[in-house]
Amino acid sequence: MDNHWKWPQIEAACRYIGEHFGDQLRQSSYPPHFYEFGVYKGTSLCLMHDWALKVGLGKPIIWGIDSFEGLPPEPFGVAPSPMFKPGDYSMAKENMLSTDACAAIVQGAANYHGCTATIIRDRFAELKKWDNMREAALVHLDCDQYGSTRDALFFLFKNQLIRKHTLLAYDEFTTGGAGPQMAHNEALHFFGAQAAEIFHYCYRDKKTNVMVRQAVWEIC
């Protein structure tokens, strides 16, 4: 797990789940379902698998969702974060591949790593629920900005995939301008949910001087 330091929120979330809900999940007929929005090359998705094993949760079912087109533009009227621009983190553009080919590569990497994962190539706003998707134990939101985070959360709430004690782990929570924090607050308000922050990590981007906070929230 050489990349664990890049995503401390994944370690924190898995350790919390193992400590507080491990016995319940191990006695369940179904393995825990983890969701990741913003897969990119699949490294953090594999880390979710590794930490679940390390804390004794067994092999989780992981759903990795990404368009592989890079970050979309923010909705009209929403000020973008100074840290990100449309097209950032486009695996397709970086490798001159189709988005389908990118999804297949990440799926192959996840399979090779031993993950029980399904990679879905889709835009968050257009995503449809699969029949075998179950309530989330953990959602990793590596969406970077307001619009994509909002679309991911609305999909999860609308399809009742977020339940009491689901953990929401953010790779960026506050990034300056409109961002994941605003989408988080909007989604919770819209769906009448509450969440308690249980972990946060801060660093400052040296180029933009923007404070970035990685965070983990538990749905109450």
Image: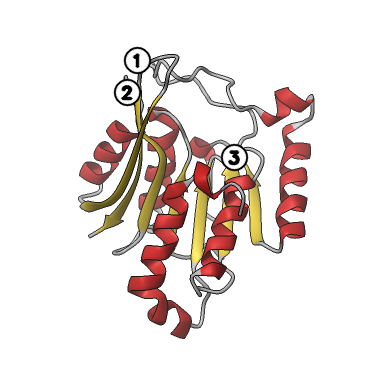
Left or right: 119, with 164 as reference point: right
Relative to residue 172, is residue 108 depicted above or below? Answer: below
The structure residue drawn at horizontal position 45% and vertical position 14%, both measured from the top left corner, is 207
Element carrying mark 2: loop
For marks 2 and 1 on the same chain, the one whose residue lies earlier in the sequence: 1
Between the residue at mark 2 and the residue at mark 1, the CA separation in whole angstroms equals 6 Å
Quarter occupied by the C terminus: bottom left
The residue at which mark 2 appears reads as 178
Question: Looking at the image, do the residues carrying marks 2 and 1 touch, with CB atoms under 8 Å apart?
Answer: yes
Question: Looking at the image, do the residues carrying marks 2 and 3 touch, with CB atoms under 8 Å apart?
Answer: no
Q: Amino acid at mark 3?
A: Asp
For marks 1 and 3 on the same chain, the one whose residue lies earlier in the sequence: 3
The structure residue drawn at horizontal position 37% and vertical position 58%, both measured from the top left corner, is 160
Between the residue at mark 2 and the residue at mark 3, the CA separation in whole angstroms equals 21 Å
Left or right: 181, with 33 as reference point: left
The residue at which mark 3 appears reads as 66
For marks 2 and 3 on the same chain, the one whose residue lies earlier in the sequence: 3
> x, y percentage for residue 104?
76, 45
> x, y percentage for residue 182?
28, 32
Tag 2: Cα neighbours inside 10 Å, few (<14), some, or many (≥20)? Answer: some
Quadrant of the rendered structure where residue 183 is? top left
The residue at which mark 1 appears reads as 79
Element carrying mark 1: loop
Between the residue at mark 1 and the residue at mark 3, the CA separation in whole angstroms equals 23 Å
Left or right: 122, with 23 as reference point: right
Element carrying mark 3: strand
